[in-house]
Image: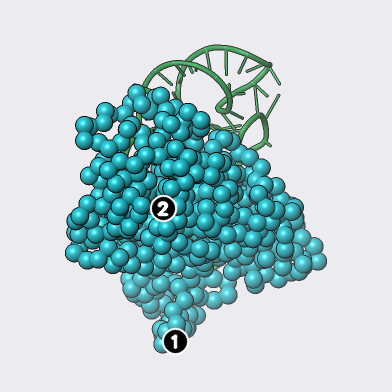
Amino acid sequence: MQLYKNQTLKVHNSLSGKKEVFQPINEGHIGMYVCGPTVYSNVHLGNCRTFMSFDMIFRYFKHLGFKVRYVRNITDAGHLENDADDGEDKIAKKAKLEQIEPMEVVQRYTVDFHNTLQKFNFLPPSIEPTATGHIIEQIEIIKEILEKGYAYEANGSVYFDVLKFNESNEYGKLSGRKLEDMIANTRELTAQDEKRNPQDFALWKKAEPQHIMRWPSPWGDGFPGWHLECTAMSTKYLGETFDIHGGGMDLKFPHHECEIAQAEASKGKSPVKYWLHANMLTLNGKKMSKSTGNNIYPSEIFTGENDILSKAYAPSAVRFFMMQAHYTSILDLSDDALLASEKGYNRLMDGMENLKNLSTGTKSDFDINTWRQKCYDAMNDDFNTPILIAHLFDAVKHINLIKEGNESISEEDKTLLLNTLNTFVYDVIGLENQSTVKDDSNALNGVMDLLIELRNQARANKDFATSDQIRDKLTALGIQLKDGKDGTSFSIN
RNA sequence: GGCAUCGUGGCCGAGUGGCUAGGCGCAGCUCUGCAAAAGCUUGUACAGCGGUUCGAAUCCGCUCGAUGCCUCCA
């Protein structure tokens, strides 16, 4: 189903700073590249938010019927601690610290990354390439840039010549910076610095003898610069110009700026049609960060073992929390906000359950087709999931009204409503129904049925002392009884 | 200091020239033996000061405040 033919999608392009009508380079096909994690530590929730935003975007594209090639890399080499000459590779540093092989570090945290994303119900990308798997491609690009005269070699390292590049191109166009301003605001080079200018960045770094991660190159043993891997891998799998490049807002400068420079210098054309940037998740009003320790790990949220939150939250509740904010807005994590989202999430899930059991009538008081298009309109407007969710709640409200007998719905509309909700809630937003704790233990269910039966017998006999005793003791155990019209059910907290 | 983004009702969070976003909480009601749960109903807020306009939270200017980037981070 090529739904995209009937929908006009707009995306916020960071390059122009405007919302633009999205038109893929090749009709019906989308190439999307997203900067993945540097696997030198566990992913924290802030990292997850960015990837989740693009997971949602990937999901929506697929739903619209586009053939999407989604490339998300793993940075397993080349990401330096800082830009100084003594800058150390993050992976290598961690390996030294833990006294293990660099590739053990990479393996450990790649596995953690995948496990975490799986809990959040991510779809796997089409290709997940690694930097170390593309050293040859990176070297080839360096050669091209050298040939074009936009880079220079110094003592076994190769640097990108930003000043030279800026003579014919515009360095800083993505982040809204002017090279002159940057020059005026940067520190002076030290005498031993190999770079010609402070703005220059490394394409290839010479490996000192003690350096473990090293590859041979025309300039001697060394390792690639961080910005280069994304250029190499995106070009290889998506071509010299592709549709969408995504990543966290914090990568806009210098990382993405450098990617543009590398691609323009080597291929002579701008690599990306639409730049999409996901905004930061903050904690206590500050950006989550690995280096400052202001962060929380997903596992700490799922187990409740942390100092910030009052309870544990299910992955889907957290996902719902994030989807209630627009991906380009800063979102602050707090217990109050998460608590509110969890309740909203449960309300949505209950609505979905109620819909299944709804009895149908001859007419509908709820215009499903109009409502359905509103859902698409929300997503078509730069993936506005908060608006979409508002519409989903509108549907829940009608479902409840129908359930209470105050409105009716036709069989045909019920099916359409169910399909649409399933599409947006499960396929696009990527939620899972985790609100009802499905305990497979038949023994527990049997015991609970027995207790509920005994309590209801006591209630029928007006023996409220006994019935309340059962209820209160179960509450103390964290089991809540819910008396409804159709009998009593229970949930475990 | 430079560049950028943003300041919305008790909280979270959309919107962006005139029309109730939504969720949570609070309150009222329904249901209930009572409660919980569930459902329904209810909120005219947009940092401050000026300006443009018939009309601005939405555009412009200034002030104040917050955050991000400028050295690693999604």
- Residue A431 location (% of width, % of height): 52, 63
Q: Is residue B14 above or below residue A296?
A: above
Quadrant in the picture for residue A215: bottom left
Chain A's colour? cyan
State left or right for residue B38 relative to residue A442. Answer: right
A232 to the left or right of A385: left
In the rendered image, the vertical position of residue A95 relative to residue A275, given as above or below = below
Report the residue at 41% width, 30% height from top. A163
Give the chain of mark 2. Answer: A
| Residue A280 in view | no
Give the residue number, with chain letter if any, for mark 2. Answer: A139
Residue A329: percent from left, percent from top: 48, 42
Q: Is residue A137 visible?
A: yes
- Chain depicted in green: B
Kind of residue indicated by mark 2: Ile
Q: Is residue A353 above or below residue A283?
A: below
1 and 2 marks on the same chain: yes
Front in this rendered view, residue B19 or A209: A209
Residue occupied by mark 1: A442
Kind of residue at disc 1: Asn
Q: How many dots with numbers?
A: 2
Of tags 1 and 2, the one toward the viewer is 2
Q: Which mark is residue A76?
A: none
* Label 1 – label 2 distance at C-alpha: 60 Å
